[in-house]
Image: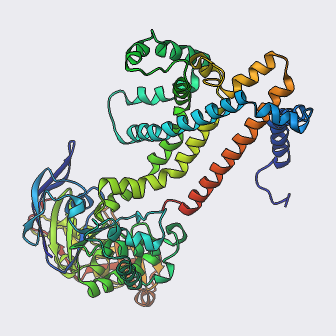
Amino acid sequence: MRASRVLPGFGVALGCTVAYLCLVVLIPLSAAFIKTAQLTWPAFVDVVTAPRVLASYRLTFGASFGAAMINAVFGLLVAWVLVRYRFPGRRIVDALVDFPFALPTAVAGIALAGLFAPNGWLGQALTPLGIKVAYTPLGVLVALTFIGLPFVVRTVQPVLEELPRELEEAAATLGASRAQVFLRVVFLIVIPALLTGFALAFARAVGEYGSVIFIAGNMPMVSEITPLIIITKLEQFDYTGATAVAVVMLVVSFALLLAINVLQAWARRRQGGLA
Amino acid sequence: MSIELSGINKRYGSFTAVDDVDLRVESGELLALLGPSGSGKTTLLRIIAGLEAPDSGSIAFHGADATATHVRERQVGFVFQHYALFGHMTIFENVAFGLRVRPRRQRPAEPEIRKRVQRLLELVQLDWLAGRYPHQLSGGQRQRIALARALAVEPRVLLLDEPFGALDARVRQELRRWLRRLHDEVHVTSVFVTHDQEEALEVSDRVVVMNHGRIEQIGTPDAVYDHPASPFVLEFLGHVNRLPDDDASGAPRYARPHEIAVSLQPQPQAWPARLAHSATVGPVTRLEFAVDGRDAPVNVELPRAEFRALSLVQGAIAYLRPTRVRHFAAAPD
């Protein structure tokens, strides 16, 4: 086995990979679990099911899911437009998509809060309509949508780019309408990539802190996200409480990602390769 | 179903892809569009299909104008060079696609769809692959499925764009003959594009030779091969030598490699030439002769046995005499 390997350095490379993953991922994660283990089971349940904490789960996971859904729809649209149409300024739009990646999240948070505050540009227009964005759960959704956009666009874009034009032409010669071509051919081929983008946007949104806290208003039970609960507990030197909540987030995120991965693997297996 | 094209023009920027083409495809025939790349043959096929719109000119199917008919309603079967099968669907669903996307009222019932797909898969002899996905099939199988899929909608005409271009030589030859037999069976008016003259000559009823967006010649395979209308057609339909001497009017004379006799003794109307190179490929031997005062070599093909009987060695002098000469008095060259 060893002698027949063509690529050199397998042992070293694998060793480095494992050590790196341990250092960066596994050790911090297990620290969270170990710290949490200081709590008794009933105490743990008490901490993680306090009404205020439960409300924060609902907001964090609910808003993250909503934001990822919005991004799945509009991200697909943006990717489609960027791939299919040639228009002046396309490159600029293309570069703008990456903006939420690059922007420090605090900057994004302050900008959004300023924009949607009752006296901000958009806030002024929306307040008379009875729509309040800043300092409400809706504000959380807006912030999470903002930071999640690039994930869907950047995962779907290459798949659309490689989608052979002939598939759509073939469908058209067989009598399919534009809508049928999209729903029965393009969309089904893009789905695995769309799921990946959705999962990434969702995961990012669940962990987002910086851009949310400015616009959320952070009212307990209403617009307080789980990462903020963790910070609050830390500031009160309740380290075990903080890690207990963190562990719950970790487990839920992991379960959701796993589910999405299984779904994705299924979709990809069906597809095999583009033929 | 006959197809009539008249005055078709198509330009891409400053490039003229199709230049004022008139063409009539007879009902039930298998027509080959043959030409080098960039000759406009694929563009012409896509215009017939409705995948491209001509800048000017008209297309009629069986006398009824179809120029403005959308590709969806044109009822053409189109087979792509790279199959264009739907990778996320089974073979069965690929073939059923055209039936399933029909408006509800025209859509056959499920048992009828099953029956028709089954029949088509039997026609292309691949019914045992119904449950597989395209990526599990070989290139030749995929192309047969693509053909079955195109036939499922009972097209008025079948259009094939370099259908065997992506296949290896042996499969290509097999599929070629199979296509010919299939066409004799279903008799749908078919047009196929190819740059391979052998393919065009072997499969089609008539050949349309194209060059620079124009039709150079239309005729049966024998007619275009034996009576080429221009030096381009002559050269495109197989190897040809320009002979060392021109005819009386100064126009060049041509002979195909297998239409040159080689002898060891001087003959009337034969030129001496020196054997530069020889290679035996299966049943024929390809010889390359150098003629004094000429840069281009003269290529000759002899049956293997005949070459052996000559026992010609490299560097030896032989006498070449064309057995059949073609010349174009008013060569437009």
Position of the N terminus of chain B by quadrant = bottom left
Residue A204 place in picture, x, y as percent: 63, 33
Residue B320 place in picture, x, y as percent: 30, 78
Q: Give residue B249's quadrant in the image.
A: bottom left
Residue sticking out furthest to the top:
A119
Q: Give residue A240's quadrant in the image.
A: top right
Whether residue B23 is situated above or below residue A234 in the rendered picture: below
| Residue B297 relative to residue A46: left or right | left
Whether residue A25 is situated above or below residue B302 in the rendered picture: above
Q: Which residue sits at x=62%, y=56%?
A: A265
Residue A123 visible in the current orientation: yes
Residue A232 place in picture, x, y as percent: 75, 19
Front-most of residues A270 and A253: A253
Residue B245 visible in the current orientation: no
Front-most of residues A94 and B198: A94
Q: Which residue sits at x=48%, y=63%?
A: B87
Position of the C terminus of chain B by quadrant = bottom left
Residue A154 place in picture, x, y as percent: 52, 38
